[in-house]
Image: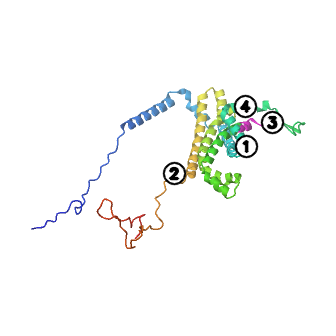
Amino acid sequence: MSQHNTPRAGHDAPPQESAPIEAIRLRHPWRAVFAVVLILIAALFIYDTAFNRPVYNWGEVGKYLFDVRIVEGAWYTLQLTVYSMIIAVIIGVTVAVMRQSPNPVVKSVAWVFLWLFRGTPVYVQLVFWGLIPTIYKSIELGIPFTDAVTSLNTKDLLSYFTLAIIGLALNEAAYMAEIVRAGLLSVDKGQEEAATALGLGWWHTMSRVILPQAMRVIIPPTGNEVISMLKTTSLVTAVPFTLDLYGRARDISAVTYQPVPMLICASIWYLAVTSILMVGQYFLEKKFAKGVSQRPDVMKPSVDTQSVRVAGIPDEGYPTYPSSAGGENIVPPHERPGGGGA
């Protein structure tokens, strides 16, 4: 009787090679249609703006875009932005720390500050600061309830430029305080407890432990506030301070009787400076976000784990355990990553 070398199914049969999967890209025809419609709308708008709207007067835009008065206005706008943000950050950090203070009086003062400057429009606040020389015509220094030692004229002491900075800074400080407070609350409570256990006081805990860790949360929204402040400077005409970018463009349009080209000039400068600030904000956020959004690699054991030894079984080879379903015994994993080494 001849023997046939018939392979048993599932044991000795050679594996069959499966055909490669042909991936078919999912089509989205409506996306292409929507993109084409957007491109056509943008092209029609640009064409209409360039050729069919003489009110834009692009020649006038090019004439005044780099005018000395416009460039000086942009410089004043930058100064207002930088000075106001520096003061706002300092006051905002102080108010945020005061809100975290265990002293109820200090905490109440910080809350009233936020309530006042966040609850009223910035334009109204700037109008009020512009009226300060009228409300307080002089500042008298001396001992209370006695004759003044010296008297200072408010109009000579505080220029409209200074009043504009004060108004913008105090309004922005209220928002910066909430940003800083959110950063402080993002730090784990255990950090404060550990600092207290080491003997650090409240102030040193805030300044040396909590605040440095909170900067990762504070920095990105602060960049947004800087960009917002740049555009908010256009409201200083309420003080009134008219040497900023928008004020100069408005003064020129009052003479040329062409407000639209001057508004375009101011907008181009605002867009240029904002674009530079957005690039700086991107790299700043990238720097402080290192290691936050990255998924950690799978940790491999530093020491090879061994199979579990069972009492009463000799330590020879790998121990086996009977299967609950019957059949072959179960062998613990070994000689593979995480399962022991040979």
Mark 4 surroundings within 10 Å by alpha-carbon count, few (fewer than 14), some (14 through 19), many (20 or more): some
Q: Name the residue: 73% across, 43% down.
A: 106
Residue 245 visible to an observer of this rendering: no
Magenta stretch mostly in which secondary structure? helix
Examine the rendered structure and indicate whether residue 243 appears above or below residue 201: above
From the image, state whether disc 3 or disc 4 is nearer to you: 4
Q: Nearer the viewer, residue 136 or 143?
A: 143
Question: Mark 4 sits on what residue?
Answer: 128
Relative to 316, is 283 on the left or the right?
right
Rounded to the nearest angstrom, the CA distance separating label 2 from label 3 is: 53 Å
Measured as percent of width and height from the top left, residue 289 is found at 55, 51
- Residue 126 on the magenta segment: no
- Of the numbered discs 2 and 1, the one sitting upstream in the chain is 1
Instruction: Residue at the far right: name it.
Output: 147
Task: Give SS at disc 3.
Answer: helix
Residue 308, horizontal then vertical, whole percent: 42, 67
Residue 156's disc number = 3
> Which residue in the structure is indicated by mark 2?
293
Asked which quadrant contains residue 110, the reply is top right
Q: Could you tell me which secondary element the residue under label 1 belongs to?
A: helix
Give the magenta range: 158-166
